[in-house]
Image (tube, helix red, strand yellow):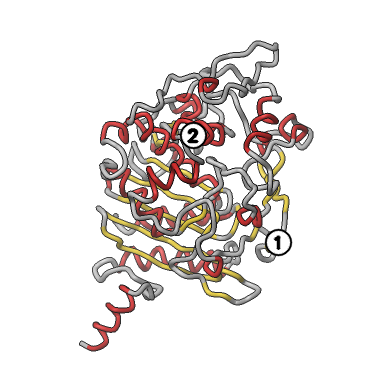
C-alpha cells in the first residue's frame, strides 16, 4: 500500500516512472519498448519521448536514451524539444480561430495583411495568393531544402526559421518575395514557407505578435504551459543531434545536414536570440505532454479551441492524394497531412488519419477511427522525423492490436 501511495505521489509531482503504461496494455508496452530499445542499441537515435493515447487515455509513455549524450544526461518525460514543423499545426489552428472570430477570411488575399508581400511568377506576373493557399501549401512557395545549393532560395538567403539567428520577419519576407514563385498559386501542392507567411498574417489579423496570439488562442486554453517561442526551462531542453555513423553527431552551434535537393542548416541557439523572427513554420519549443493536449483537442473536435466543423475542415483532405504530402496516398488539409489511401500508402493507419513531422527529429499522427494519438519526439534528425524509428513505433502500436 505504501509503495502504491508513493508511486502515485511521484506521478502527481511529475516524477513518473519511465514506463507509465497502465496494466492491461502489456502488448503495446512490449512492442513499443522493443522498437525504442532497438533504435537506441543500433545508435540511430540518442534519446526520445514516446506517448500513445487510446480514446484519450495514455496507454504508453516512456522517456528513453539521453537528452545530452556527452553530459550523460538522461531523457525526461517533460523534456523540452525544438519542435520545428510541429509548430505549423498550431499556427494553422490560430489562423482558423481568427476565421471563426471574423477577423480573417480564408479567401483574403495575403496582400490585405502584408501589402509588401508580392512574389511574382517567372514571367513577371503577380498572382493573388490567399490565406487558404497558405494553409494548404498551394501558394507557389518552396523551401531551400527543395532546391540545389545554388538555387534561388539559397541565393536570396531565405531563412527556414531554424537558422540565421537575429533575422527579422520583415527582412525574411522581403527575401522570400524577391524569389520567383515555383508554380501558379492554387495549381499544385508544395511543402513550403507558406506557414511562416501565415504566421505574419495571424499576427497582423490578431493584433499582436505571433507568440502572443498563439498563446491566447491555442496554448493557454489548452493548458500547454511548457510550449512557446522561447525556452521555458533551459535545463530541460534537449541537445540536438544529426544522423551519423557509427552514431549520431552533435549539431553544435551550427550544422548543415544533407537532405532533399540540398539540405538543412540547423542553428540550435537561434531559439535564445530574442531578435529572431517568430517562425510560424518552425519556431516553437515544447513537450510531448503538451503536444498530446493539442492533438487530443483536434481528435475530439477541438471544442476548447475550435468549433467541431472547423476541425473537420482542418483534418479533411483539401488537395487530393496527388499532393503525396507524406508519400503516396497522402493528401493535405488546412495545415496537416491527411491519409487518403492507406493501401497506396502501405500504412496500417485508417483513412482520415492526420499527421506531420518536424525536422529536429519528430513525428506524430492521429487516427480518429481507432481513437489513437501517437507522438514520437527525438533529439535526432532526420531519423526521428522520417527514418525507420517512427515507422517502427507506428507498426508496433498497430501490431499490438490498438
Task: Identify the residue at horizontal 36%, vertical 49% (top origin).
Answer: 294
| Inter-mark Cα distance, 2 to 1 | 35 Å
Task: Identify the residue at horizontal 40%, vertical 63% (top origin).
Answer: 32
Instruction: Specify whether 160 is left or right of 111.
Output: right
Decide: marks 2, 1 in contact (CB < 8 A)?
no
**x, y percent for residue 190:** 56, 29
Front residue of 274 and 198: 274
Residue ID for mark 2: 328
Looking at the image, is 215 positioned above or below residue 182? Answer: below
Front residue of 264 and 109: 109
Tag 1 secondary structure: loop
**x, y percent for residue 277:** 61, 43
Q: Which image quadrant for residue 304?
A: top left
Front residue of 258 and 77: 77
Instruction: Specify whether 264 is left or right of 298.
Output: right
Looking at the image, is 134 positioned above or below residue 337? Answer: above
Numbered tag placed on residue 357 in the rendering: none
Residue ID for mark 1: 252
**x, y percent for residue 281:** 54, 41
Q: How many C-alpha atoms fall within 10 Å of the one at disc 2: few (<14), some, or many (≥20)? A: some
Q: Which image quadrant for residue 63?
A: bottom left
Amino acid at each position: 500500500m505504501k509503495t502504491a501511495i508513493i508511486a502515485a505521489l511521484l506521478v502527481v509531482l511529475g516524477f513518473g516512472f519511465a514506463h507509465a503504461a497502465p496494466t492491461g496494455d502489456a502488448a503495446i508496452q512490449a512492442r513499443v519498448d522493443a522498437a525504442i530499445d532497438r533504435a537506441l542499441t543500433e545508435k540511430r537515435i540518442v534519446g526520445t519521448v514516446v506517448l500513445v493515447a487510446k480514446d484519450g487515455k495514455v496507454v504508453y509513455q516512456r522517456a528513453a536514451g539521453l537528452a545530452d549524450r556527452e553530459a550523460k544526461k538522461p531523457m525526461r518525460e517533460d523534456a523540452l524539444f525544438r519542435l520545428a514543423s510541429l509548430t505549423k499545426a498550431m499556427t494553422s489552428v490560430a489562423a482558423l480561430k481568427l476565421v471563426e472570430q471574423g477577423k480573417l477570411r480564408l479567401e483574403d488575399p495575403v496582400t490585405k495583411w502584408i501589402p509588401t508581400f508580392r512574389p511574382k511568377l517567372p514571367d513577371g506576373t503577380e498572382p493573388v495568393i490567399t490565406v487558404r493557399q497558405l494553409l494548404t501549401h498551394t501558394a507557389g512557395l518552396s523551401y531551400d531544402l527543395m532546391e540545389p545549393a545554388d538555387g534561388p532560395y539559397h541565393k536570396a538567403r531565405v531563412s527556414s526559421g531554424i537558422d540565421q539567428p537575429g533575422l527579422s520577419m520583415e527582412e525574411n519576407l522581403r527575401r522570400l518575395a524577391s524569389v520567383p514563385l515555383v508554380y501558379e498559386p492554387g495549381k499544385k501542392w508544395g511543402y513550403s514557407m507558406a506557414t511562416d507567411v501565415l504566421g505574419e498574417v495571424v499576427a497582423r489579423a490578431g493584433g499582436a505578435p505571433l507568440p502572443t496570439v498563439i498563446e491566447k488562442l491555442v496554448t493557454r486554453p489548452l493548458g500547454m504551459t511548457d510550449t512557446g517561442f522561447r525556452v521555458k526551462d533551459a535545463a530541460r531542453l534537449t541537445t540536438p543531434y544529426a544522423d551519423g555513423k557509427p552514431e549520431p553527431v552533435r549539431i553544435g552551434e551550427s550544422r548543415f545536414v544533407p537532405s532533399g535537393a540540398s539540405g538543412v542548416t540547423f542553428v540550435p541557439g537561434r531559439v535564445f536570440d530574442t531578435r529572431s523572427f517568430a517562425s510560424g513554420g518552425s519556431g516553437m519549443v515544447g513537450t510531448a505532454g503538451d503536444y498530446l493536449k493539442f492533438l487530443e483537442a483536434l481528435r475530439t473536435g477541438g471544442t476548447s479551441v475550435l468549433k467541431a466543423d472547423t476541425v473537420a475542415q482542418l483534418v479533411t483532405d483539401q488537395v487530393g492524394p496527388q499532393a503525396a504530402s507524406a508519400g503516396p496516398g497522402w493528401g493535405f488539409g488546412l495545415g496537416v497531412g491527411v491519409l487518403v489511401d492507406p493501401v497506396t500508402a502501405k500504412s496500417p493507419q485508417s483513412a482520415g488519419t492526420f499527421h506531420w513531422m518536424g525536422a529536429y527529429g519528430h513525428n506524430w499522427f492521429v487516427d480518429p477511427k481507432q481513437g489513437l494519438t501517437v507522438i514520437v519526439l527525438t533529439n535526432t534528425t532526420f531519423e526521428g522525423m522520417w527514418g525507420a524509428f517512427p515507422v517502427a513505433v507506428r507498426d508496433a502500436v498497430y501490431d499490438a492490436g490498438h
